[in-house]
C-alpha cells in the first residue's frame, strides 16, 4: 500500500512539474506604426519645445531606419539621432 502511495505521489509531482515549467504561449504582437510594433508618439501634443524637437528628431530617425534588421536598426538610430549636449 505504501508503494502505491509513493508511486502516485511521484507521478503527480512529475505531472505538476511539467505544467509548472511549460512555456507560456506568446501573444501575437500588436500592430503599430513603428518598428517593433510600437505606436509612434504624436509630437504635436508635446508642449515643451526641447522635448518636442527631440520627439520630432526621433520620429525622423525612425522613418529613416524603418525596415532594418535589429543590429542595423540600432546602429542607424544611434547615427540618426542628434548628439546629446554635455
Image (cartoon, rainbow, N blue to C red):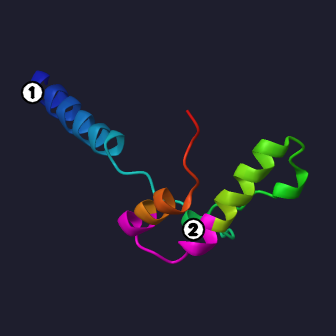
> Could one spot residue 28 in this view of the protein?
no
Is 41 a magenta residue?
Answer: no
Q: Secondary structure at mark 2?
A: helix
Find residue 7 and report its horizontal and vertical position in percent: 14, 33
Q: CA distance from mark 1 to mark 2?
A: 58 Å
Q: In this rendering, would 8 be left or right of 70? A: left
Residue extending furthest toward the top: 2
> Could one spot residue 12 in this view of the protein?
yes
Q: Kindly indicate whether the residue at mark 2 contacts the one at mark 1 (C-beta within 8 angstroms).
A: no
Dot 1 surroundings within 10 Å: few (below 14), some, or many (20 or more)?
few
Q: Residue at x 54, y 64 (%)?
A: 36
Find residue 79 and report its horizontal and vertical position in percent: 47, 61
Question: Which residue lies under the disc numbered 2?
Answer: 35
Residue extending furthest toward the bottom: 67
Number of numbered discs visible in the structure rendering: 2
Relative height, residue 2 to residue 66 (above, below): above
Q: Residue at x 88, y 57 (%)?
A: 44
Identify the main secondary structure in magenta: helix
Which comes before the other along the chain, label 1 or label 2?
Answer: 1
Find residue 19 and report its horizontal and vertical position in percent: 35, 44
Amino acid at each position: 500500500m505504501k508503494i502505491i502511495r509513493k508511486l502516485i505521489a511521484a507521478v503527480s509531482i512529475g505531472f505538476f512539474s511539467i505544467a509548472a515549467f511549460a512555456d507560456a504561449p506568446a501573444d501575437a504582437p500588436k500592430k503599430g506604426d513603428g518598428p517593433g510594433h510600437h505606436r509612434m508618439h504624436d509630437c504635436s501634443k508635446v508642449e515643451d519645445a526641447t522635448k518636442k524637437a527631440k520627439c520630432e528628431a526621433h520620429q525622423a530617425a525612425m522613418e529613416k531606419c524603418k525596415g532594418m534588421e535589429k543590429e542595423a536598426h540600432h546602429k542607424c538610430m544611434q547615427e540618426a539621432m542628434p548628439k546629446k549636449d554635455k
